[in-house]
Image (cartoon, helix red, strand yellow):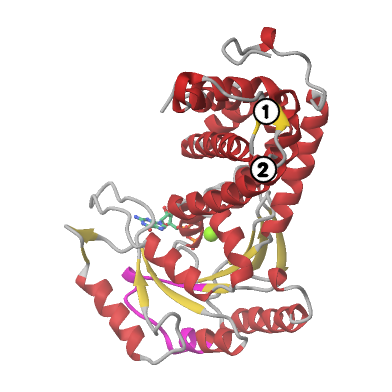
Amino acid sequence: MSVDKPGPEATPPARGDLAQNEVESLFAQRLAEAFASLGCFNLAVFGKTGVGKSTLVNAVFGSQVAETGLGKPVTRGLVYYRHPGGLLGLYDSEGFETGASGDEILAVLRSRVAESRVLPVDQQIHAAWYLVRWSDRRFEERQGDFVRALADLGLPVIMVITQVPSRDGVPHPEALELAQYIESLGLPLRPGGRALLTNALEDPFTASPVFGLQELLDATYLVVPEVATAALTAVQILDWERKRQAAKTIINQSVALAAGVGAAPIPFSDAALLVPTQVTMIARITAAYGLPADRSRTLAAAGAVVLTGGATMAGRYIATNLLKFVPGGQVATSAISATVAGSLTRAVGGAWARVCEYALALPPAERDRFLAGSGPKELFLAYFTGKRR
Ligand SMILES: Nc1nc2c(ncn2[C@@H]2O[C@H](COP(=O)(O)OP(=O)(O)O)[C@@H](O)[C@H]2O)c(=O)[nH]1
Ligand SMILES: [Mg+2]
């Protein structure tokens, strides 16, 4: 087999090649497993009607939860939503102006928390955000009681002042005053007894920018247990660096696995031996970025097209990327070494991560169209071959 004329026509049918539909169903299966292993981040959001609970949740997690998540009433004033990918469980209070309703919510939460003590930790409530609108300019005693009661249940409570206008990076002084007042009450707030100032929506009239959301997310990471952070990273839409790091970790693990496969040099034609490792890798990357699981069928098709050309792709990759580093441009053996298996896998992972980021950056409707079409495949190949940087 010649490496200077790679391509489908130059490649004999590989012995180990999996059929496209086999890879597709393997991918769908691996994607489901990857989502399941991320677990679920469970968040409870409290605050009066109109403080901006839905708006804040949309800003941090996207509109998917509220729009497509099925809401199940837990009790009067408390609804539980489950993210369609299963990555986020959200308790949304509908505002509790009356004390009785607040007591009812606490009673239900108390029994939920008691029940969930014996459940796996990813089914427990991991954090609570308590929202106060700055323009209400007050924080009542019974709101403080409610916060204390939540903390008594073992929930880490993060205090969030919402809809705060700012100018030139300086928040409205009365919002600062309210935060300081709340902080002076000595409530069991996390982290560090602080009240965070936020604006989740740009205000066209005052031209007040969005701010404080990354701080809220960072505070949330500080309080949630380790088991919930992978789901949080996948489901949040603000902090891309954390997603990127998660993908990097997955790629490194897969590279190590692939290098193991290649440790006994395998012929080009058996490059397909790497496919299962790479299928698992791109499924895990897809889940880590939090791309919709319900698009798995079309994504699987894209992944299959990309990966079934195992030998072809390996040949091409070596010809275009590695030969130039080999003195004289010759590869001594027509075999894939551990190094090549590793770098081929890294290239596949890196290109797929960039496809995920591209999809994530699209508005939801456009993203659905992209994921349903041949876009992921074409973009993958463009990144993989270096045609697109
Ligand atoms: N400017 C601005 N408006 C907001 C913000 N949060 C909510 N709003 C507006 O306040 C109203 C109530 O928000 P919503 O999220 O439905 O409150 P909820 O009842 O607590 O869920 C809506 O008209 C939002 O557009 C914010 O951070 N900034
Ligand atoms: Mg709401």
- Residue with the mark numbered 1: 335
What x and y, as percent, mark residue 244?
48, 49
**Element on which disc 1 rests:** strand
Q: Residue at x 68, y 36 (%)?
A: 295
Q: What label does residue 258 carry, if any?
A: 2
Q: Is residue 384 above or below residue 196?
A: above
| Label 2 close to label 1 by CB (< 8 Å) | no
What x and y, as percent, mark residue 219?
44, 71
Q: Quadrant of the C terminus?
A: top left
**Would residue 66 be visible to someone looking at this image?**
no
- Span highlighted in magenta in the image: 129-145
**Of the residues shown, which amino acid type is indicated by label 2?**
Ala
Q: In the rendered structure, does residue 188 fall within the stretch colored magenta?
A: no
Front residue (pair 171, 28): 28
Front residue (pair 354, 369): 354
**Of the residues shown, which amino acid type is indicated by label 1?**
Ala
Q: Residue at x 75, y 47 (%)?
A: 32
**Element on which disc 2 rests:** helix
**Would residue 34 be visible to someone looking at this image?**
yes
Q: Residue furthest left?
A: 168
Q: Residue at x 31, y 76 (%)?
A: 137
For label 1, count other residues whose C-alpha is less than 10 Å away and answer few (under 14), some (14-19) or many (20+). Answer: some
Q: Residue at x 52, y 89 (%)?
A: 148
What x and y, as percent, mark residue 1?
69, 14
Q: Residue furthest bottom?
A: 186
Chain-order first, disc 2 or disc 1: 2
In screen coordinates, is 262 left or right of 136? right
Quarter of image, ligand 1: bottom left
Q: Is residue 197 above or below residue 362?
A: below
